[in-house]
Image (tube, helix red, strand yellow):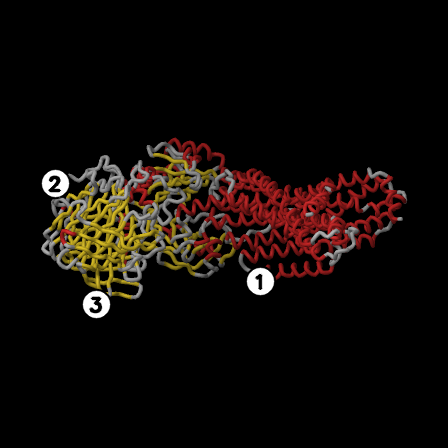
């Protein structure tokens, strides 16, 4: 696996430093998200090749029968080098898969890279199938999925069943990312029940829990003065909370959040309503990364402490970032996932 | 005080500039030869590394197919079964090797091309970019694809994306093989369950092409080491002499209260500076040596092994460092004994220089003992040892043992000469020569090693040439060879040719894996050409007859040695087993080869048809036929091989090899000659007390000078006579031990008496040249100086 090459592909031709992983690059020639967002399912579960970047991003909080917590990640990224392109090997579409399992004291990560156009990786909307090499996320429809991934030291095989509807972030799925108006199409399926088997160096573990699948695509999701983000997906008993803050070069933040009722009714919160503040930092992979947070959404009476289950959940992939399961305490108790990018 | 001490020490060099010159030049020459040879080797290796890195050969396991290609669908199926494989496609574009890789999945990227330019990477993946050296790019036509000159790509290779390669080679959805990344996902499905028709091959490790050429490099390295040893003899002599002559200075300094530790440190620093300066000069000279040699080495290697080496030299930092280190290390080695003696010297030791020249004579018994022990060790290693290390250990023991034995043997020979002397003059001559021996022994050892190296290496190269050209006569038995591009053309060619020539011999071959080794199976037409020309090294009775009846197979020596196959053993391919009936020499072929009869071959591999033909015809008609083929079939020049052309090319390759060895021979002999010159010059002043009485008794100075030259010639001749068996032993070790270990085949050894006589002649010339100046100096010694000897004695 040639991990050095992928960031080069994410970086646009003229860029030197334009946001995390080149996500602040110009969208020249690519389509850009427009308001109002109008979705067409199931075809929108499939790829949108005319947008620069897109992902199918699944995280799960799991528990073994003895109560031991685990975290799991299955992600497929699509990145287009150019807006138009050839067939076969000349296709400008590139795919990157990340899979991880987090335990309280270990974090297993593996990565796959693939060219588009040759069948090594891709997504079809109906029947739904997302794959890269031997990893797959498949089902007759989006509600019932089978998921596998395998690395040199771990593997998993999971079954997912949606217990609620798909929810849309921002303005019905048009999610604004900066004051300058950069935006993405963004929806989630946060209601999956998940069960299956983790294969770890110490043996197989039967687990069950909750999974959250994010779908997002855009051509310029960040503005060029944004350096990274801190993203939370929390299950809080009386509801679920998706919130993120985008860090800007001038030290300010752009925040956004969605409150999701158990029946799937959502409330979107504009910049400033949601807040997340680091409480303590740890040194991971030679960087200082906050793994304990105070997260507040006053409108819903949320004031909680979010604590990583394993501080060392560093994704040592070609585009490195932190991604791991968390526990929530305070006004609400629960579990969730935290993603932090752009920590140098 | 330190400054005063330093000045006192340095004054020695001011008074003895020739000694300083000897030291610096000796060390520079030693370093130059060593680092020059190393540079040539390093440059050639860098070229192979680039090639190996490109192909992932050696490092990574590979998946191949019996039919030679793998479909792209099979590649995807393997990826989806958890095999982290990466595609490789290979072909020829305008006669240049084109390799397509997938940078995203290849474990080594598309090394050696460093991709750190985003725009270039995108272009490479989507539009196509060809990476190659400028020379290579100049040899291909315009394909509407961007080209980038990249000096790190192996010469004669174009690297590009797999998709671009498929397009340019017009091989859509086809791959040549797959590289397997070391990482294996837990749930990987066994290969046999996914693709039973594909074969997983373990990394080839050291058995690839690079290893073959190692033999050549090892020989060069041995040469470099010998040259360095010769140089260090000179340095050792110069440093020993300087220490002896500085004894009075040292004693005086010590008596004045100069601390011993500081004195040793000062001398150490002085030697360090000298060795660094000499080392720098040596590396510079080495660069010149390497630059002069490299084009020849490159041509030799590409001619012999089909490996391209870039013919240009790059100044590599590691090369500077190793050159300086070897100079400093060599000086330390040469000076260690002298420094040790200085550190232990009693404060009021005699300031009178000991007869330095006689010092080497002491401990002669010990020296003889060590020499005998080393020679025995060499014998034991040759008898019992195996492997390259044992081979080189044997060489080292043999050479050092012989060098140490030289003074002892010469002493006995001179004693014998003295016993036979009839006249007073003759008796004095023998005795005086014997008396000088200790002072000259270091220089003579250097001469011995230089001569032995020359005899050894030229024997090896000449034997190689004789064997190889003989082999070419055998192997390229047909006058003309034609390669078709495809089956259709092959059929047309054959029909066309059969009416025009004596006999068309189809050459059909297929790649097979035999005992885990990549090999080629050939099915030649039964024809007297083969029966007459392919001689077995080892064979069962009636081997050709049985092979023609399809009972068994013949294999080449490479396969026999690497897979440890003997006559009568069974080999398996295409699902059937065959006894090995004959083993034939196949010089220079990197891979194994198997020959079965044509009917059996067609039975085993019905899908393979011959694209190559050997043609028996009148050699004079070949050029006309070539023109006809070119005009009728549009056959490219590369598709036609004129046997006479190949032979001429091979011979020119050997001639270049001779140029290299010749140049190295001259250099080592020159170094040895220089050692003799310096020893004689040093001895000249010391010997006045011995010569003055002879002069006083009536021998003219001119006569003394002549005797000086005669003595040098005599010693050189004696040394040459002793060097001959040593050189032959060296050649035997290179051919029968080192070659087998490195190449996988043994070369027969031939003797070249005329060459040896010429070498002895060179040695004598070197000795005469070296003694001319000292002799002339002696002949012109002022009588007053000679007389002074007597007054000094009183």
**SS for dot 1:** helix
Q: Is residue B230 left or right of residue B165?
A: right
Q: Are marks 2 and 1 on the same chain?
A: no
Q: Position of residue B238 (x, y in %)?
A: 70, 47
Q: Nearer the viewer, mark 1 or mark 3?
A: 3
Nearest to the observer: residue B266 or residue B546: B266
Q: Calculate the distance from the C-alpha at mark 2 to the C-alpha at mark 1.
A: 87 Å
Which chain hosts label 2?
A
* Residue tagged 2: A36
What residue did someone put label 3 on? A65
Measure the C-alpha gap from mark 1 to mark 3.
65 Å
* Residue shown at the point (11%, 56%) measured from the top left: A262
Quote the CA–CA distance across marks 2 and 3: 45 Å
Circle 1 is placed at which residue position? B384
> How many residues crowd around disc 1 within 10 Å: few (fewer than 14), some, or many (20 or more)?
few
Which of the 4 quarters of the picture holds residue B487?
top left
Residue at 66% from the left image edge and 56% from the top image edge: B401
Classify residue B414 as left or right of residue B624.
right
């Amino acid at each position: 696996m040639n991990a050095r090459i992928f960031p080069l592909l994410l970086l646009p031709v003229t860029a030197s430093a334009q946001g995390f992983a080149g996500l602040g690059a110009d969208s020249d020639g690519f389509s850009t998200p427009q308001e109002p967002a109008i979705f067409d399912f199931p075809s929108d579960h499939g790829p949108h090749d005319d947008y620069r970047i897109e992902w199918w991003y699944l995280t799960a909080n799991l528990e073994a029968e003895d109560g031991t917590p685990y975290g799991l990640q299955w992600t497929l990224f699509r990145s287009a080098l150019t807006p138009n392109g050839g067939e076969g090997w000349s296709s400008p579409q590139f795919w990157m898969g990340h899979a991880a399992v987090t335990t309280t004291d270990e974090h297993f990560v593996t990565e796959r890279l693939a060219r588009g156009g040759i069948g090594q990786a891709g997504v079809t909307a109906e029947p739904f199938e997302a794959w890269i090499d031997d990893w797959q996320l498949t089902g007759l429809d989006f509600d019932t999925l089978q998921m596998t991934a395998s690395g040199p030291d771990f593997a998993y095989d999971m079954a997912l069943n949606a217990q609620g509807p798909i929810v849309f972030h921002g303005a019905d799925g048009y999610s604004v990312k900066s004051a300058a108006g950069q935006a993405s199409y963004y929806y989630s399926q946060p209601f999956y029940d998940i069960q299956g088997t983790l294969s770890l160096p110490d043996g197989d573990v039967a687990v069950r829990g909750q999974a959250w699948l994010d779908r997002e695509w855009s051509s310029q999701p960040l503005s060029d003065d944004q350096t990274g983000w801190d993203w939370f997906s929390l299950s809080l008993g009386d509801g679920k909370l998706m919130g993120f803050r985008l860090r800007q070069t001038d030290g300010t933040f752009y925040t956004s959040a969605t409150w999701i009722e158990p029946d799937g009714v959502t409330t979107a919160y504009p910049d400033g309503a949601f807040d997340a503040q680091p409480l303590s930092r740890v040194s991971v992979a030679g960087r200082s990364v906050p793994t304990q947070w105070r997260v507040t959404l006053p409108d819903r009476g949320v004031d909680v402490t979010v604590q990583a289950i394993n501080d060392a959940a560093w994704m040592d992939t070609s585009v490195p970032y932190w991604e791991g399961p968390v526990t929530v305490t305070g006004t609400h108790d629960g579990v969730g996932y935290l993603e932090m990018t752009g920590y140098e | 005080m330190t400054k005063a001490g330093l000045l006192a020490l340095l004054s020695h060099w001011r008074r003895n500039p020739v000694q300083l010159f000897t030291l610096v030049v000796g060390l520079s020459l030693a370093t130059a030869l060593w680092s020059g040879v190393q540079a040539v080797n390093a440059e050639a290796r860098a070229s192979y590394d680039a090639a190996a890195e490109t192909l992932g050969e050696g490092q990574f396991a590979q998946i191949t197919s019996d039919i030679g290609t793998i479909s792209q669908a099979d590649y995807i199926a393997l990826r989806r079964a958890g095999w982290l494989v990466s595609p490789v496609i290979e072909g020829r574009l305008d006669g240049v090797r084109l390799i397509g890789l997938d940078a995203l999945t290849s474990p080594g990227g598309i090394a050696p091309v460093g991709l750190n330019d985003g725009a270039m990477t995108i272009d490479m993946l989507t539009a196509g970019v060809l990476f190659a050296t400028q020379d290579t790019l100049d040899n291909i036509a315009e394909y509407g694809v961007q080209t980038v000159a990249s000096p790190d790509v192996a010469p004669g290779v174009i690297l590009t994306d797999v998709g671009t390669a498929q397009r340019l080679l017009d091989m859509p959805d086809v791959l040549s093989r797959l590289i397997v990344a070391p990482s294996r996902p837990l749930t990987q499905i066994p290969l046999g369950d996914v693709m039973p028709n594909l074969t997983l091959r373990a990394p080839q490790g050291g058995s690839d092409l690079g290893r073959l050429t190692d033999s050549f490099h090892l020989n060069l390295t041995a040469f470099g080491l010998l040259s360095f040893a010769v140089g260090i003899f000179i340095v050792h002599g110069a440093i020993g002499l300087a220490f002896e002559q500085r004894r009075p200075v040292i004693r005086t300094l010590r008596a004045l209260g100069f601390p011993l530790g500081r004195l040793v440190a000062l001398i150490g620093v002085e030697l360090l500076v000298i060795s660094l300066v000499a080392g720098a000069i040596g590396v510079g000279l080495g660069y010149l040596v390497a630059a002069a040699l490299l084009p020849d080495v490159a041509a030799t290697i590409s001619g012999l092994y089909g490996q391209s080496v870039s013919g240009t030299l790059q100044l590599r930092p590691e090369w500077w460092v190793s050159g300086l280190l070897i100079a400093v290390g060599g000086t330390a080695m040469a000076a260690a004994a002298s420094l040790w003696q200085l550190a232990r010297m009693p404060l009021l030791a005699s300031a009178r220089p000991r007869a330095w020249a006689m010092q080497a004579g002491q401990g002669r018994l010990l020296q003889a003992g060590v020499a005998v022990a080393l020679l025995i060790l060499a014998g034991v290693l040759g008898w019992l040892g195996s492997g390259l290390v044992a081979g080189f250990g044997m060489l080292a023991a043999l050479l050092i043992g012989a060098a140490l034995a030289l003074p002892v043997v010469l002493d006995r020979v001179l004693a014998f000469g003295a016993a036979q002397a009839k006249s007073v003059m003759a008796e004095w001559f023998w005795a005086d020569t014997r008396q000088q021996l200790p002072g000259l022994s270091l220089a003579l050892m250097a001469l011995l090693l230089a001569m032995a190296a020359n005899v050894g290496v030229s024997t090896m190269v000449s034997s190689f040439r004789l064997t190889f050209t003989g082999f070419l006569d055998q192997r390229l038995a047909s006058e003309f060879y034609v390669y078709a591009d495809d089956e259709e053309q092959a059929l047309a060619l054959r029909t066309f040719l059969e009416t025009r020539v004596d006999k068309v011999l189809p050459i059909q071959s297929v790649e097979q894996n035999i005992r885990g080794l990549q090999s080629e199976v050939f099915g030649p037409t039964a024809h007297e050409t083969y029966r007459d020309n392919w001689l077995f090294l080892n064979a069962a009775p009636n081997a050709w007859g049985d092979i023609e009846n399809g009972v068994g197979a013949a294999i080449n020596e490479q396969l026999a040695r690497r897979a440890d196959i003997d006559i009568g053993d069974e080999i398996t391919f295409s699902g059937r087993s065959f006894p090995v009936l004959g083993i034939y020499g196949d010089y220079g072929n990197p891979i194994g080869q198997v020959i079965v009869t044509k009917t059996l071959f067609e039975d085993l591999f019905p899908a393979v048809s011959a694209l190559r033909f050997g043609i028996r015809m009148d050699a004079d008609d070949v050029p006309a036929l070539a023109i006809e083929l070119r005009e009728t079939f549009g056959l490219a020049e590369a598709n036609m091989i004129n046997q006479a052309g190949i032979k001429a090319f091979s011979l020119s390759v050997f001639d270049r090899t001779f140029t290299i060895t010749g140049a190295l021979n001259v250099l080592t002999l020159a170094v040895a000659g220089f050692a003799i010159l310096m020893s004689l010059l040093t001895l000249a002043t010391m010997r006045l007390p011995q010569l003055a009485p002879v002069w006083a008794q009536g021998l003219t100075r001119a006569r003394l000078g002549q005797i000086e030259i005669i003595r040098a010639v005599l010693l050189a001749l004696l040394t040459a006579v002793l060097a001959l068996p040593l050189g032959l032993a060296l050649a035997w070790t290179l051919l029968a031990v080192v070659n087998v270990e490195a190449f996988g085949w043994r070369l027969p050894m031939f003797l070249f008496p005329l060459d040896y006589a010429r070498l002895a002649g060179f040695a004598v010339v070197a000795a005469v040249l070296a003694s001319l100046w000292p002799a002339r100096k002696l002949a012109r010694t002022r009588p007053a100086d000679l007389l002074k000897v007597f007054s000094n004695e009183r």
